[in-house]
Amino acid sequence: MSKLTPPLPRFLRPAPPRPGRRPAPGDNGTGPPGRRTGGKRKRGRVLRDGAAEGGTAAVGWLDERSGLSPFLRGFLFRKVPKGTDWFHTLGSATMFAFVSQAVTGVFLAMYYEPDPSRAYESASYITNEVFLGELVRGMHKWGATVMIVLVFLHMGRTFVFGAYKYPRELNWVIGVVLLILTLAMGFTGYLLPFDQRSFWATVVGVNINASGPLIGPYLAEFLRGGAEFGTTTLTRFYALHMLLIPGLIGALIGAHLYLVAKLGTTAPPWLKAEKKELSREEL
Ligand code: HEM
């Protein structure tokens, strides 16, 4: 183990053998309570210790084969700078919103049909007939807005704290791609209910894309799945919305977090200012 690896947390360390406990012949400590083992309390303790040791053994088994624990310990028990506060939770909040979108999206995909003649009916069916369907659809719809608000707040925080500077430029660039992909999730998801509003809003959105320089017309044709809005447009948006874009977001969040763990987070700028003032006083 490297010197920099933080120690294993107490709940994962194997319990030391209890002094003075000599098992009677044939008593492996898990037998039924009785005079010999000291009654209910002792049996409860034995079971609890057994369960804890079982858990530790399972973690040990997994660690021996995967070698994950130094990485996880470094990631979960790393030092954070002085002044770390609620502003630093915005990235994790964005990630939580993404996970919530992925989970609710899986349940919606169990009932939604990406066929122009069935999409609207299947979405209405989810709201009106499926058990908790309205709740799950509402969570997914409002969760999209929440994720977009959070990603902007998180970006604002990293900008104000100067976290885009050396050596975190690459993480900023990954963040920009994540922002674009998050907005693309909102755009591709908007068409799926396939009502009048979502249809015409998407027509407008695709036309705006078409007016972009150089790649604009190609991008619009790719999104439509042809020269005109047709049956392939909906299936294309569905595939982008539930396979390609979330897959990319998941992979990029992995890279983003790897860099956060490797480079650490940035202290608030007002702490640095305080430090400077102090050193000036000292001079
Ligand atoms: C799906 C979207 C995103 C997720 C899930 C996400 C997640 C995170 C998490 C969990 C952290 C560590 C905790 C924190 O500092 O808040 C972080 C840090 C960071 N993120 Fe993001 N992020 C996302 C988008 C963005 C965007 C849009 C940008 C900027 C364009 C960005 C730039 C950064 C930077 C520079 C750091 C390092 C912060 C520091 O050194 O203090 N991220 N991100």
Image: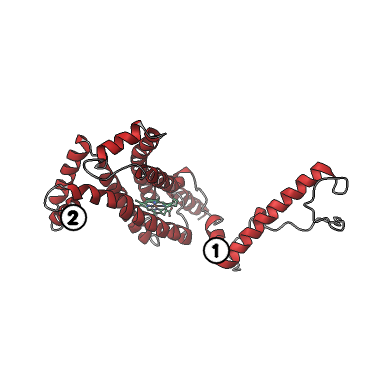
Q: Residues within 10 Å of mark 1 (few under 14, many from 20)?
A: few
Residue shown at 33% from the left, 58% from the top = 173
Location of residue 112 with respect to 220 vertically, above or below: above
Residue reaching furthest bottom?
A: 2
Could you tell me which secondary element the residue under label 2 belongs to?
A: helix
Residue 132 or residue 71, whichever sits in front = 132
In the picture, residue 6 is in which quadrant? bottom right
178 or 199: nearer the viewer: 199
Secondary structure state at the residue bearing disc 1? loop
* Res. 188 visible in picture: yes
Left-right relation of 17 to 124: right
Rendering coords of residue 85 (x, y %): 49, 45
- Residue labelled with disc 2: 222
- Which residue shows up at 79% across the image and 53% down it? 29
Q: Counting residues from the N terminus, which is met first, the one under dot 2 or under dot 1?
A: 1
Q: Position of 207 compared to 108: left or right?
A: left
Specify the quadrant that holds the N terminus: bottom right
Q: Is residue 176 visible?
A: no
Residue 137, position as x, y percentages in the image: 36, 37
Give the side of residue 92 with respect to residue 42, left or right.
Answer: left
Residue 60, horizontal then vertical, whole percent:
63, 62
Residue type for callout 1: Leu
Q: 10 Å neighbourhood of mark 2: few (<14), some, or many (≥20)?
A: some
Whole-percent x, y for residue 78 in the image: 54, 57
From this view, report whether residue 34 is shown above or below residue 67: above
Where on the picture, by quarter, is residue 26? bottom right
Q: Closer to the camera: disc 2 or disc 1?
A: 2
Tell me how far mark 2 sits from mark 1, CA to CA.
Answer: 42 Å
Give the residue at mark 1.
68
